[in-house]
Amino acid sequence: MDNFSPGSIQPKAKKTFGGKTSMGVTCVCQVPVAEGKSVQQTVDTLHKKLEQLGAVKQGSFWVDCETYHPTGNVSGQPSKLLYVMHNSETPLSCIALFEGGPCLIADTNFDVLMVKLKSHFQNAKAHKVECRGSRYRYCDFLIKVGTVTMSSSARGISVEVEYCPCVVPGDCWNLTKEFMQSFLGPSVPELPSVFAAKPEGLFAPSDCVDTMTQYLELFNKLRKMQIPGSNVR
Amino acid sequence: MSGGPAVRVSIESSCEKQVQEVALDGTETYVPPLSMSQNLAKLAQRIDFSQGSDSEEDGTEGEPRDREWSKQEPEEEEGTVKFQPSLWPWDSVRNNLRSALTEMCVLHDVLSVVKEKKYMALDPVSQDPTAGKTPQVFQLISKKKSLGTAAQLLLKGAEKLNKSVAENQENRRQRDFNSELLRLRSQWKLRKVGDKILGDLSYRSAGSLFPHHGTFEVIKNTDIDLDKKVPEDYCPLDVQIPSDLEGSAYIKVSIQKQAPDIGDLGTVNLFRRPPKTKAGTQLWHVKLEAAQNVLLCKEIFAQLSREAVQIKSQIPHIVVKNQIISQPFPGLQLSISLCHFTGEKKNHRASPEKPKSDDHLYVLEHNLHQMMREFHKQQLSSVVMPHPASAPFGHKRMRLAGPMAYDKAEISSLQQSEGLLEKIIKQAKHIFLRSRTARTIDSLAIRIEDPQIQAHWSNINDVYESSVKVLITSQGYEQICKSIQLQLNIGVEQIRVVHRDGRVVTLSHQEQELLDFLLSQVSQFPD
């Protein structure tokens, strides 16, 4: 995947300013709603488990995703959708990506730019997906449990686990998986395809783009899941 | 015959012959030397006849000589003429000589006219007969007259100046309200509301966020009896400042060893004698300045107390009435208090200790004022130019926050988060640490006689860092034994010692640690 950052050439290695840690390795997975329970109840169960483990609640988080259809001549093939996503972890940025294609990390002024490009990219307002929830910190791990909603109807539960000290997925995947097992139980996911799909494989450093790609995959899956038969593009 | 450098016309041939060609067998063929006429022609070309105006005597002599030469060789062709190759080489010489002759004849005629006076006579131009030697008395009279006119002019000017000065003094006595108002307006902001004149003495236009209105009112002083003599400091203008800004105030920052009793807190209300007013400043100016100072002190104290309450620190700060107490080091107490003196009566409830003027750290008070004003300035102009049209205001690095996907930790590290109180506590810590280090070193130097301890303090310091160089030498053996040199960098909470050989030791703020370390260095000194 190509990464474009306007205004600067982003080197592969993460820059740290003032010794602060950059983003670690993230894994986003979906937790199925427990049998006979509502989404909210499942989320509460997860919160309880985390608190029992010893995690400390540290505020809330949100991730959202807006879809844009490119207008103009489509030469037969279905046009690729543009997704613009925001993350509360990087409050001053927004990430624009095509599924499986190039992606861009930009300032929040990018949203205004998209408004100006109304004639070329149409906002599909009905397809806006949001994920909100609380944020827990357990030593070096950052766990975010959120409810995925699309047009104010809850569609599923997402869990994001970030191991902050490490940036290389190959080094810490096993540790992360073991940690997730401790509170997620049986619904532990496999290694996210994002890491494996990189040209350098598992040992390339990961950044926020990987996180957002995982979220996008999850949102798309959830979107397709609950609307059977409708015209989903 | 030429006026300038004399050229010798010589016909002796030089002994040296120029070599024209060297044959294969070694014989040399010489260039045939110039013949007499050729030589002469060459040299005559170098004579500059146009310079001959101041030595006509030489000219008359040289003339016939050259005429002889030209008669002898009239037909010589010369190939070395530099200019006018078509004419014969003596042409220029002849022309110059002819012109010289003309001038000579003219001169001769003039002289003969002057001498003989037969056909013409010289007659001087008639002059004024009275332009001769004038009598001295007349000179004196004329000088006196001219000086008199000059003096009259000066006197007239001086009279005018005297009159205007006298008028000015009259005016000052009368004190026009409007002119005084104009003077006030030149230094303070005024506006007219209805029929009242209000002014603004707050720092709001300079960037302050303090919610005090800072409005003062200008009133006309009409209680004057024109019949009686006008008092010296009479002013037709008076200002009425808000009641809570009356008097004078200052912020007292002091570091004390012992912790005070709880009952003593909040009773610090020492006052300083108000500064002497400069002669010439108006009463309203003094009043307004004092009120502005009170306002600034209040703002500083409000900011400090707000931070003391909000910011969580390991040892909480105590805020009591007009005093903030915090503990920079264990056993030490920093107290910042707002001392506001209002009214005429002296406040006899001074704290039990006599006002120790050396207790008050003037430097920190000044720094507080300075930091507050810096904060104002930052509020006012937080734009760094040149500025991209689409970027948000603030720190330059923040523009990168979006494209580089900074997380919250990185963003907060970019934004300055240190408040006024934290800064002043750090500065106080540093000052205390520095003075205690100085005392320790000095006491050790006095106590120990054998290796001598010298301390050279650096003149240029930072608010958070100072440095001193400690030398331990032995008298008489400075060259033989290597002296121990230690560079101490005194920071906010630690002292870093750098040896001469590069070892770095970090000491904490404990006095004993520094003392032990110095003693160990002294003992290492070879006897």
Image (tube, coloured by chain):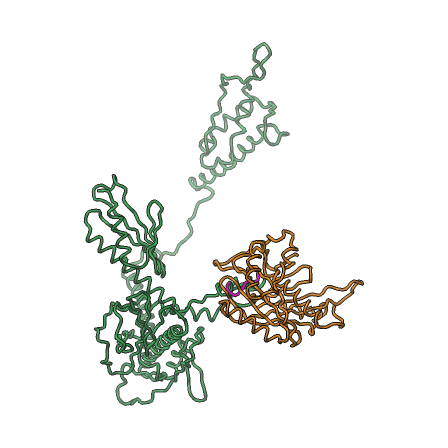
Picture layout, residue B449 above or below residue A72: above
Residue farthest along the right direction in this orientation: A76
Q: Nearer the viewer, residue B176 or B244?
A: B244
Quadrant position of residue A28? bottom right
- Residue A90, given in percent of the width and then of the height, sits at 56, 65
Q: Nearer the viewer, residue B109 or B151?
A: B151
- Residue A35, given in percent of the width and then of the height, sits at 64, 73
Could you tell me which residue is drawn at 51 percent across and 30 percent down? B47
- Residue B407 magenta-highlighted: yes
- Residue A151 magenta-highlighted: no
The reply to whether residue B146 is visible in this rendering is no
- Residue A16, given in percent of the width and then of the height, sits at 51, 57
Position of A147 with respect to B454 (left or right) is right
Q: Quadrant of the C terminus of chain B?
A: top left
- Chain B on-screen colour: green
Position of B29 with respect to B381 (left or right) is right
Q: Nearer the viewer, residue B219 or B62?
A: B219
Colour orange, chain: A
Q: Main secondary structure of the magenta part?
A: loop
Could you tell me which residue is drawn at 47 percent across and 26 percent down? B8
Give the magenta range: B404-409
